């Protein structure tokens, strides 16, 4: 598991924030409990050139070897929402997950032995088999995460 800060320039970060505002979201949930849908999901973005461009920029800034994306989407957590414990490779379609935090603040990403602070312009890279969740969004604003599911070893 690794994090990188200040991944994108301020002008590009502002474009990302603007694009996220205009995505279409639908109810979504995760985890093993029978909880109602607690957060929103943007749908598949991998075929959209803008989101692929961002991944290409990530590859120029971050030393990772995996370069094939199986999925890309944005999660939106309104105030008081969260995700339950889950793994990202349940269907074995990815080996690693990238989460990018575009907002000024939000709930942390929690793993069994570690918490990753939600910090604007931070990128988190981790093994998709790791159990994790999102803490409750205790802010008064929406918390967004841009997620790339990466194929390969």
Image (cartoon, rainbow, N blue to C red):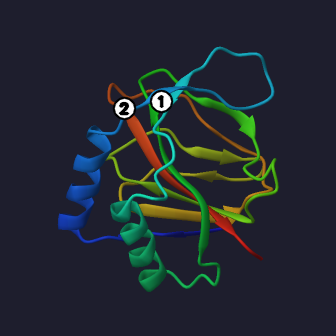
Q: Between residues 115 and 127, which one lies in front from this camera angle?
A: 127
Q: Earlier in the sequence, mark 1 or mark 2?
A: 1
Residue at image position (46%, 57%) is 100
Lateral position of residue 150 relative to residue 34, left or right? left
Residue at image position (48%, 80%) is 59
Would you place residue 83 above or below residue 20 in this image? above
The location of residue 54, given as percent across then percent down, is: 38, 68
Would you place residue 118 above or below residue 22 in this image? below
User: Residue 142, which numbered label?
Assistant: 2
The location of residue 26, given as percent across then percent down, is: 48, 26
What is the residue that sits farthest to the front in this orientation?
47
Q: Quadrant of the N terminus?
A: bottom right
Lateral position of residue 13 relative to residue 79, left or right? left
Q: Quadrant of the C terminus?
A: bottom right
Badge 2 element: loop
Residue corresponding to mark 1? 137
Badge 1 element: loop
The location of residue 25, given as percent across then percent down, is: 42, 31
Residue at image position (50%, 80%) is 62
User: Residue 5, which numbered label?
Assistant: none
Q: How many badges with numbers are in the image?
A: 2
Specify whether residue 5 is in view: no
Whether pointer 1 and pointer 2 mark residues with C-beta atoms closer than 8 Å, the reply is: yes
Lateral position of residue 123 relative to residue 151, left or right? left
How crowded is the residue under tag 2: few (<14 C-alpha within 10 Å), some, or many (20+)?
Answer: some
């Amino acid at each position: 598991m690794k994090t990188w800060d200040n991944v994108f320039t301020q002008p590009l970060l502002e474009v990302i924030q603007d694009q996220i505002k205009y995505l279409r979201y639908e109810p979504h949930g995760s985890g093993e409990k029978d909880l109602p849908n607690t957060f929103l999901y943007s749908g598949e973005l991998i075929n959209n050139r803008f989101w692929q461009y961002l991944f290409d920029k990530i590859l120029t800034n971050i030393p990772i070897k995996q370069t094939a994306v199986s999925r890309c989407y944005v999660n939106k957590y309104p105030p008081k929402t969260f995700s339950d414990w889950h793994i990202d490779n349940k269907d074995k379609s990815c080996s690693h997950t990238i989460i990018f935090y575009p907002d000024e603040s939000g709930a942390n990403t929690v793993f069994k032995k570690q918490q990753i602070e939600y910090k604007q312009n931070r990128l988190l890279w981790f093994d998709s088999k790791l159990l994790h969740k999102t803490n409750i969004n205790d802010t008064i604003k929406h918390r967004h995460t841009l997620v790339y599911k990466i194929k390969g070893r």
